[in-house]
Amino acid sequence: MIPLASLQSTAEALMAKAAIEIPDDYLAGLRRCADTEKGDLSAFVIQAMLENYEAAKEDRRAMCGDTGVPRWYVKYGNEARVEGGPVGLEAALRRATARATTGVPLRPNRVHPLWRTDHNNNVGINAPEIEYAFHPEGDWVDLTTVHKGGLFGSDYRMLFPGDGLEGIRRFFLDTLIGFGKRGLACQPAIVGIGLGGSKDACMVLGKQASCLRTVGSRNPDPKIAAMEEEFRELGNSIGMGAMGFMGSSMVVDCHIEVGYCHTGGMPMSVHMFCLSSRRATARIFPDGRAEFRTDPDWFTAYSRRDTVEWGETPLLAAAQ
Amino acid sequence: MAGPLKTVELNLPASREALAELEIGTVVYLNGRLFTAREGVYKRAIEDGAGMPAANVDLGTANFHCSPAAVIEPDGRFNVGAVTATASFRFAKWLDGWFKLSGCNIIIGKGGMTSEIYRDVFVPHGAIYLTTVGYGTGALLGRGIKDVPGVYWKDELGLAQAVWVLDVERFGPFIVESDLAGNSLFERENAKIAPGLARLYEGTRPATLRRYGETDDKTDEVI
């Protein structure tokens, strides 16, 4: 049985880590941008951001004043049992979110959409969002928090099979150019693309592709993996860098996730995880121990399965 | 690597002479007093007729479009962690009234506004626009805050929308986006990038299903 106190204290630690520490994979990707950026203004911006990450870590203060809208991704190993059950876990995550808002501190960003009511703790109706996944083996729970900014850089479009790859390319460019000007998307970004699924699933897949995969990871379908690299290069050839200044630093990496969709359609979503790509993950075991990491390991062979049954593949391979 | 950009330190409140020396693309660090104000403050001060929450001398004349990641401790102390700007273009409609009411001559924010707004509203009031960098260098800016002499309208507007007065030292970096002549750095950069856009779209055609209000002119902006 995983103790609730461990879940809550780990969740609070994750909230602070996400807000303060830029993940290593994004940092390495941004340094590669810095090495190749020729635009003087764009290069200055990236250099300032690199210094900013150091200041955040040294001072233990949030790297960005807009600390985004904190949310949670929870993955249960199939044998995991949590003290207080799923309701207990949700209570622990809401408490951790509220406590970290004053503890770090974070900006109390969450308000009612109409009445603008602010509880000053980032908790409210349907907030923080909590999404779930399951894994075929394991007695642990993985907690991931993502603090993504909320206003610019995402879009959805219903394309059709006849629009083809060129239609995908065009909508990708539209989104990057539209939100890249003036740096509204806070690029260079991890661009996530959702292809297929129902409309809502399409948005969810694209968002998870940007926020829950590490820079350098590739989709297991080799043709999709090639698209990811092609689109990264395409984005970096627009001529636009950080803050929309002339340059080549738009896309730190591009990730594509797919879901089976209606036979008549090809829905697509684009999401941009920004210069403060805030995510942190921990695995919590029944003895209360927590192992922290920056790779959410959200997408697996199990989560991407396309068969009715699971089990033809050995379970260990699925865990990879 | 590219060469260094021109960098200046600007003391607040800034004189017109000091602002006149700033060109678009110059890096600026600020010393002195400034305050945060965004849509909640504009609506209350201008539309609801509440006026300014305090005198110029208490607030300063530089307005930061920002909500800090900050908390008021139980003993009343202010704990400001990180600060970064929020996108300014949404606030353009209030600015003429705001300049008249507040006497501000510097607006600090994210992403700037259009040169039309600069010419029509900023230039007549002798005001410039500084953009934050990144966005955003929240931790570096947080370091530059030396004191929080006051927070106004926190009960009326909540912590995020309240007026936070900040005393700062070498607070930055910022980049001059609009000068006293109303030029826009972002529009200059857009114009440089625009000629290369058409080739990116070669071989593509508009999506089968169109959307209202859609344009195929990629030199347009979304703001």
Image (spheres, helix red, strand yellow):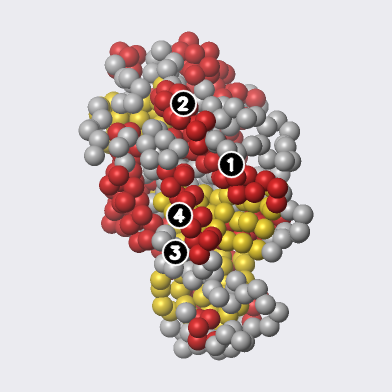
Taking the spot 61% from the left edge, 56% from the top edge, the residue there is A194
Residue topped by disc 3:
A217
Answer yes or no: do the residues labelled 3 and 4 have beta carbons within 8 Å?
no
Foreground: disc 3 or disc 4:
4
Mark 4 → mark 1, Cα distance in angstroms: 16 Å
Secondary-structure class at tag 4: helix
Q: Which mark is residue A170?
A: 1
Q: Amino acid at mark 4?
A: Glu
Mark 2 → mark 4, Cα distance in angstroms: 25 Å
Residue topped by disc 2:
B195
Q: Amino acid at mark 3?
A: Ser
Taking the spot 71% from the left edge, 79% from the top edge, the residue there is A308
Q: Which mark is residue A200?
A: none
Q: Quadrant of the N terminus of chain A?
A: bottom right
Which residue appears farthest toward the top when viewing the image? B124
Secondary-structure class at tag 1: helix
Mark 3 → mark 4, Cα distance in angstroms: 11 Å
Foreground: disc 3 or disc 1:
1
Q: Is residue A188 left or right of residue A144?
A: left
Q: Amino acid at mark 1?
A: Arg
Query: Quick one: label 3 or label 1, which is nearer the N terminus?
Result: 1
Q: Position of residue A122 (x, y in %)?
A: 57, 56
Mark 3 → mark 2, Cα distance in angstroms: 33 Å
Residue topped by disc 4:
A229
Foreground: disc 3 or disc 2:
2
Query: Quick one: label 4 or label 1, which is nearer the N terminus?
Result: 1
Q: Position of residue B46 (x, y in %)?
A: 60, 24
Crowding around mark 2 (Cα neighbors within 10 Å: few <14, some 14 to 19, many 20+) is: few
Same subunit, tags 3 and 1 = yes
